[in-house]
Amino acid sequence: MNTAKNESQCITAPVKKKAVLMDGVYLNGPTLHIKAAEVFVQEALPLILEEAVRKAIDVREKVCEWQPPERLKEILDLELKEEGEDHSKILERCRDAMRYSVKTGHPRFFNQLYAGMDPYSLVGRFITEAINPSLYTYEVAPVFVLTEEAVLKKMMEFLGWDNEGDGIFSPGGSVSNMYAVNVARYNHMPGIKEQGLCGTPRLVLFTSQECHYSVAKAAAFLGIGTNNVYVVSSDERGKMIPAELEKQVLRAKEVGALPFMVNATSGTTVLGAFDPLEDIADICQKYSLWLHVDACWGGAALLSQKHRHLLKGIHRANSVAWNPHKMLMAGVQCCAFMVRDKTGLLQRCHSAQASYLFQKDKFYDISYDTGDKSVQCSRKPDAFKFWLMWKAVGTRGLEERVDRALALARYLAEEIKKREGFQLLMEPEYANVCFWYIPPSLRKMPECPEFWEKIHKVAPVIKERMMKKGSMMVGYQPHGNRANFFRQIVISPQVSREDMDFVLEEIETLGKDL
Amino acid sequence: MNTAKNESQCITAPVKKKAVLMDGVYLNGPTLHIKAAEVFVQEALPLILEEAVRKAIDVREKVCEWQPPERLKEILDLELKEEGEDHSKILERCRDAMRYSVKTGHPRFFNQLYAGMDPYSLVGRFITEAINPSLYTYEVAPVFVLTEEAVLKKMMEFLGWDNEGDGIFSPGGSVSNMYAVNVARYNHMPGIKEQGLCGTPRLVLFTSQECHYSVAKAAAFLGIGTNNVYVVSSDERGKMIPAELEKQVLRAKEVGALPFMVNATSGTTVLGAFDPLEDIADICQKYSLWLHVDACWGGAALLSQKHRHLLKGIHRANSVAWNPHKMLMAGVQCCAFMVRDKTGLLQRCHSAQASYLFQKDKFYDISYDTGDKSVQCSRKPDAFKFWLMWKAVGTRGLEERVDRALALARYLAEEIKKREGFQLLMEPEYANVCFWYIPPSLRKMPECPEFWEKIHKVAPVIKERMMKKGSMMVGYQPHGNRANFFRQIVISPQVSREDMDFVLEEIETLGKDL
């Protein structure tokens, strides 16, 4: 063994006396130099605080330090080699990794449906990474099993499911939506778990054209098939049209297919639209369909007395997906999947009862061994960071965040209406503010197809320029027949009114020559 | 807004001049007190280092501080309330959470297929939690996209797939195995993605009786059905019997079912057995079946020149699941799913081409936008911590870990053979050492059914006692017709020979009165 690098490496220990030789390996005391490991971690921590926290949330710093892939590969020196490197080199690599990463906690990162840095959640995540648990059983993760249960219970209260319901955290809203399809299907025809879909009638589910793409992914993955996702039209604001849903249900029945589930969306990805849950629930009741609500993005509004009307009727859902890592800032990932059933449906649907893990002869109440409700085996304790944050800021603090984010979105929309060269797609009702920027050269042009063709090319160029400058990040996309537009996502609480003003000024600065 | 608690809370800022009132919310500068947040994180870090690193890996400390669920609920004070709590209270909660958690990094935690603390991986995880990325696109996660690519490339070299292959990290080996079933199915009948399984022939897959339970979960989840998982007998060591596999394939064909895939296991969960891959690959070739190798646990052996023969033939696999969070200590979770195909099969199988995320008119090479290869949308950068650790210890360092773990397992097996009252199930060929403890009262009894009934009750009692004492954690389970036995899992490098001796002595101490 190499003992020369002890001081700058944590592993490899000198061979002591009384070591036993076994299969060519000297077995003696631990090969981890605990002191060296501690020194390394202690040297790394201030670096992380500086580069990934302090600078990353400082509005005066860049959101990103753009490098094209080929150049960044050289900088990072990616290749994995036979010999290791010493601590000073590894710390340099840590610094580079942080330097060239996009700062999602930065006040001018508006690119996804999450942003910002919450110090309580961050500390919660540091704790769970250091403890390194996996959430199969109470025995190996007692604190994390109980905090998950407490968070789910509280979230279900906000759904209006008092003393009802069951749930599990999953690795992403897409997975939660898959869980919904699977549980709905199992509820409808439990035999499918054993017999599969071969020989069953054609199962059909319904969702709006504005839903998240994970619904189609779920249908493909679960063997239902994307053709059996019947797409329901939305209105001009992006909300599912209940009458169209009923038409689609009848169409499916007419051709002999078996409708089993509706996916409604509370907070669509692009427009931030909320489907009318009460009307949809009526139709589900009429035709005995499972109602799943994808509230991954919009669920946060439930915490606001002012805005929770957006999800009116959610108490009637059979299942709900809600991601506190989005507007509530619990850190990626934090994704709850909840079912109203309390007869153990979730567990029956997903369980495999592995005897090496879920032993029946344990000495404690094994109803706390919740891992078999999941299709995962190893599972991260994603609820804990949210629990800790909720303890720190209280329900009132979470409510303030939501109210502030939505007030900022409203402010931005008002500013857009006032400014020449900016055009709203529609009045926002949530935190998605969608708008076009029209450069001076196009402002006099009539809104003909050629105009829209030119507008379509504006956002990608401005995006490229903002990335290279590192001044901010805002997403853009085409949508249906609409030319590329910006979608600004507002997440509280680090963002200020001044940042909203900045966005519009910066777009103007970057795009006025187009 | 409440400004009284500023010094002990990070959120809520005083209303400044020039604030704008919008929807009842004063919009001014950020409400995050950056200084207060920094102070909080800085106060928490030494606590984490002390409780979740230093004490957690110190052999003189307890592995766990056991409390039954009802008592732990009281201690943790789980309820989420209207008002938040100040920093000193939250730090107390952090301390409690760590105190009552099981220390999976402790040298005497042998309970699961992972253990130990690697300081490089830990720093990598702190970095990614602070940066809080999500791995959809190069644009938002450049460093993490590239490090994932580099790690996959290197892992595929160890599979013997030089210049071939594609892959993605997934949230768990169970999910990787699901990916395998889905890709194998898509490769066999691509139309299923759109049309679903309704109307297709009955698809059947094959796996051994010793495989991980996720194969059955995958079949249920993907709509194939657990009845269509044909279970192949294993030999007395837990290895799949190739002739039995061929029999099962023929049986499926005889009844008109459509065999499409074999799951072979390299490192079974309980016994640590390796299926004979060359023979299985021959059968797969003969019958045109997709060969998936679940090497989640055993893949680590590929890094050892001494032990890689266990996976001989893995280069012939069509897909492989391999979890570096297990023996290689990259931290939960770190799970690679790899396919040998390099024609984009993985992407075609899983993609949904969301236009708001995977825009085609970006200014860089969008082949780096790898997110659509996954069925997740948000995805954690699990490869980075492994990349950083590999850089630090080198391939040689990883090899030493594997060799040491397996030498320790061998040492333990030899000690068991020497000691009265201990009985090996079989000679280990990997890091699973399975054995019974026979208390003095039973040592003279013949091995009749009554003897085994009594033995069956020994391990649960010893487990309860070790948990309550906090001295160590070792798993037990029944298996087939075998009565409850201990399964000791050895992970290098923090574990020493002395810990192996301790385990046997402690079991004797805890169980000698039984």
Image (spheres, coloured by chain):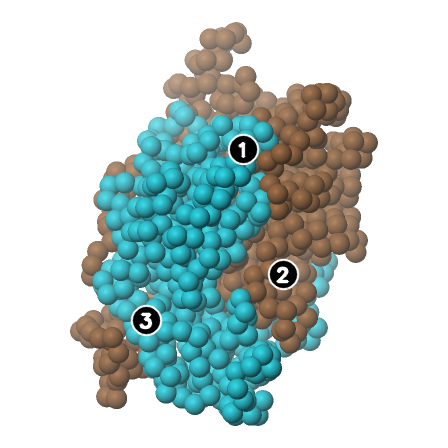
Chain colours: A brown, B cyan
Going by the numbered disc 2, the residue's amino acid type is: Thr
Identify which residue is drawn at 58% across, 29% down: B199
Above or below, comparing residue B335 to residue A445 in the picture: below
Location of mark 2 (residue): A370
Q: What's the distance in space between the residues labelled 1 and 3, CA to CA?
A: 45 Å
Q: What's the distance in space between the residues labelled 2 and 1, CA to CA?
A: 35 Å
Q: From the image, state whether disc 1 or disc 3 is nearer to you.
A: 1
Residue A467 seen: no
Residue A5: x, y in percent? 20, 71
Residue A471 position by quadrant: top left
Q: Nearer the viewer, residue B78 or A374?
A: A374
Q: What's the distance in space between the residues labelled 2 and 3, CA to CA?
A: 32 Å
The chain carrying label 3 is: B
Disc ID at residue B388: none
Location of mark 3 (residue): B406
Going by the numbered disc 1, the residue's amino acid type is: Pro
Residue B31: x, y in percent? 58, 50
Question: What is the secondary structure assignment of the residue under circle 1?
Answer: loop
Question: What is the secondary structure assignment of the residue under circle 3?
Answer: helix
Q: Is residue B403 left or right of residue A127?
A: left
Residue at far front of view? B254
Location of mark 1 (residue): B201
The chain carrying label 2 is: A
Identify which residue is drawn at 60% across, 82% down: B450
Q: Do the residues at discs 1 and 3 belong to one chain?
A: yes
Q: Image quadrant for the N terminus of chain A?
A: bottom left
Identify which residue is drawn at 47% across, 60% down: B210
Residue B433 seen: yes
Residue A66 position by quadrant: top left
Q: Image quadrant for the C terminus of chain A?
A: top left
Q: Is residue B351 left or right of residue A355?
A: left
Identify which residue is drawn at 46% across, 18% down: A456
